[in-house]
Image (cartoon, helix red, strand yellow):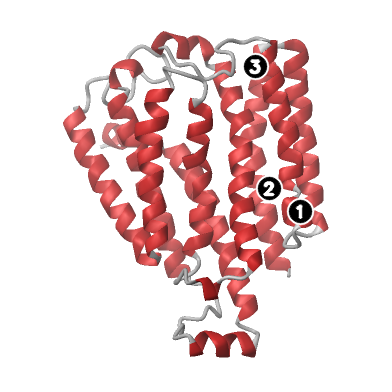
């Protein structure tokens, strides 16, 4: 049983799946808080009732939150499963992946495919239960990650850009999932701003995140022919682009405050976190040492949950 659980965890990349679900669940709570604020406005409530929208949010729907977590986890797990099926022979070549269940021979690709399809259908059905668009976005995410990003990893560094799109969809999916209906009347202009900005923050963050990981694991990646660094090697240009991406992340992370749904505290948190991130990336640019790349990588692990939690606490405090 212990080996089975370990293999399943490796198959679905449990820590990655957990991170994805975390960002979606935070965005869901932000979306619910926005609606709770509107439910205090009698005129808005009257308008919704006149439009036939009786499911007005007065308190956080924890049941839907759990559905989002379960559905999001299954969809992410399915995408990771398909990724490992496609890369089974390549995983055998790399030290970090050769003990995964399929390359190690403890699971067949047929078994993996059955699990992946089951998780994809169940996860999509659960997310579609929240609203149709959320389910469709989850399908798009699976297809883009497994069948576009995965094969591109051996062809071109543009794979990082392609992979950043499904990687940034969870906050958008989470925010949309907070709305039982996606009729245009349910949305204010600020909702579109929030949804797009939540997507943008996670989208831009993924470039220094992925490139730092690619720098650290470059020797292992080369065994499988993966080309994820901007220039395909650990050089000054790759380090420069990593540094520039952290600089771009700073103004992007300040957009919630600029557009009026984030306060000065979250702006301060984002600015401090962004400056630390950029400083570590600058040291990588100057030194181009493995230890500096590891510091950028570990900083990226903490950056995104810190900023997202800060945004959530900002909404709770309102």
Distance from Cα at disc 2 to Cα at disc 1: 7 Å
Q: Residue at x 43, y 67 (%)?
A: 64
Nearer-N-terminus badge (2/1): 1
Residue at the disc numbered 1: 266
Q: Position of residue 287 (x, y in %)?
A: 75, 11
Distance from Cα at disc 1 to Cα at disc 3: 30 Å
Q: Quadrant of the N terminus?
A: top left
Residue at the disc numbered 3: 238
Q: Position of residue 14 (x, y in %)?
A: 41, 39
Q: Position of residue 51 (x, y in %)?
A: 48, 85
Label 1 crowd bin: few (<14), some (14–19), many (20+), radius 10 Å: many
Label 2 crowd bin: few (<14), some (14–19), many (20+), radius 10 Å: many
Nearer-N-terminus badge (2/3): 3
- Is the C-beta separation of discs 2 and 1 under 8 Å? yes
User: Splitting the image into 4 quarters, where does residue 150 fall?
Assistant: top left
Q: Is residue 249 visible in this depiction of the protein?
A: yes
Residues 73 and 206: in front is 206
Q: Residue at x 71, y 38 (%)?
A: 249
Q: Residue at x 59, y 74 (%)?
A: 35
Circle 1: element type: helix
Q: In the rendered structure, find residue 307 and report the number of the disc placed on it.
A: 2
Q: Residue at x 76, y 30 (%)?
A: 278
Q: Quadrant of the C terminus?
A: bottom right
Label 3 crowd bin: few (<14), some (14–19), many (20+), radius 10 Å: many
Extreme residue toward the front, this view: 184
């Amino acid at each position: 049983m212990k080996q089975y659980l370990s293999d399943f965890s490796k198959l679905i990349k449990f820590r990655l799946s957990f991170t994805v679900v975390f960002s979606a669940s935070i965005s869901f709570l932000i979306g619910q808080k926005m609606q709770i604020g509107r439910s205090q406005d009698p005129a808005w409530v009257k308008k919704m009732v006149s439009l036939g929208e009786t499911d007005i949010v007065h308190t956080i729907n924890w049941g839907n939150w759990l559905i989002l977590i379960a559905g999001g986890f299954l969809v992410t797990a399915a995408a990771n499963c398909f990724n490992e099926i496609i890369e089974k022979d390549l995983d055998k070549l790399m030290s970090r992946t050769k003990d995964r269940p399929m390359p190690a021979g403890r699971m067949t690709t047929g078994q993996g495919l059955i699990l992946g399809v089951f998780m994809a259908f169940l996860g999509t059905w659960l997310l579609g239960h929240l609203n149709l668009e959320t389910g469709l976005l989850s399908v798009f995410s699976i297809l883009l990650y497994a069948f576009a990003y995965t094969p591109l990893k051996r062809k071109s560094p543009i794979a990082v850009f392609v992979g950043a799109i499904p990687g940034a969809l969870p906050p958008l999916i989470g925010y949309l999932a907070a709305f039982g209906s996606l009729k245009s009347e349910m949305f204010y202009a600020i909702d579109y701003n929030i949804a797009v900005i939540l997507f943008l923050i996670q989208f831009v963050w993924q470039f220094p995140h992925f490139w730092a990981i690619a720098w650290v694991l470059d020797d292992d990646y080369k065994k499988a022919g993966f080309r994820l660094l901007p220039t395909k090697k650990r050089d000054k240009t790759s380090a420069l682009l990593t540094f520039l991406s952290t600089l771009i992340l700073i103004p992007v992370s300040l957009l919630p405050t600029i557009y009026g749904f984030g306060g000065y505290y979250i702006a301060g948190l984002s600015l401090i976190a962004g400056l630390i991130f950029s400083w570590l990336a600058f040291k990588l640019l100057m030194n181009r040492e493995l230890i500096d790349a590891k510091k950028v990588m570990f900083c990226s692990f903490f950056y995104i949950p810190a900023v997202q939690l800060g945004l959530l606490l900002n909404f709770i405090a309102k």
